[in-house]
Amino acid sequence: MEPSTQFSPRVLLAIEDLRLRRTNEAGLRAAGFSVSAPGDADAVSVLAESFSPDVLVIDTVMQDTDDRPLYQRLRHDTDGYLLCIESAGRDRARVELLRSGADDAVSLPVSSDEIVARCHALLRRPREIRTGWDPVPSSIVTLGPLTIDTGRHEIRLGDTEVPATRIEFSLLEHLCRRPTEVASRSELLESVWGQNWVGDTHVVDVHLSNLRRKLDQAAPELRVVHTVRGVGFRISNEVLDAAEAQVAAGQRAVARQAQPAADDEVEEHLTGIQLG
């Protein structure tokens, strides 16, 4: 009988070799996973969103429509655990995969039992998104042209909405709530991934790099996230300057509105003196 898939962890399996794909699909299903195993990159990209996989097992030889490695596209668009399968069999290749955002990497040949075991191991890692600030933080943070709305899970630059994954949103929210401070990689890992995160700290760089590309598309003339080399990341001076200018403009507007009222009070006072 097919295991119940209602509450089964979901695996998106994208392997170019048909025999290898079917072998691993059968192994994962037998282990209780709900598996989707499309044969082409377009279907993989669609299912990465609609299927909401917990783990993505991706063959690094698969390319997207832009002739870019498919796993890079998926790392850009999803927050699921990413297990890459590469055929080179070189340690250096696996290291590069991990540094480019993969959560785990293996080389061929690899058994379906090992793929199953690695998927289970990934799912044992804590990856809950949590917040480390006040229990009732403001739902909207505005810094000049940048607005973070936690209630709507929305990022806007001016009038443009910026799409972001759950992790990208949480990283930017953390930086925006402490806009004048530098956040280290370890601080961001603890805040977004949790204290028990196990993995390469450069996963922070990968997600922030993806977010930067999206912000640059929305406002090419504005840098939002600044890298402090050897320390961490913070909100850029351009955004802080714009925020200060916005506050100053608001104060001037309030002052202009208050001035006529003050003039009226003086005039009434003088009129009263003349009548008296």
Image (cartoon, helix red, strand yellow):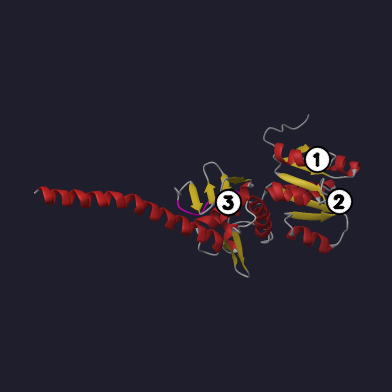
Residue 162 part of the magenta-drawn span: no
- Mark carried by residue 61: 2
Residue indicated by mark 1: 42
Task: Identify the amino acid type marked 2.
Answer: Val
Task: Identify the amino acid type marked 1.
Answer: Asp
* Stretch of the chain drawn in magenta: 128-134
Q: Earlier in the sequence, mark 1 or mark 2?
A: 1
Residue indicated by mark 3: 170
Q: Quadrant of residue 234?
A: bottom right
Q: Earlier in the sequence, mark 3 or mark 2?
A: 2
Q: Most prominent secondary structure in the magenta stretch?
A: loop
Which SS class for mark 3? helix
Which SS class for mark 1? helix
Q: CA distance from mark 1 to mark 2?
A: 14 Å
- Whether pointer 1 and pointer 3 mark residues with C-beta atoms closer than 8 Å, the reply is no
Of the two numbered discs 1 and 3 in the rendering, the one whose residue sits closer to the viewer: 1
Q: CA distance from mark 3 to mark 2?
A: 31 Å
Q: CA distance from mark 1 to mark 3?
A: 28 Å
Q: Quadrant of residue 46?
A: top right
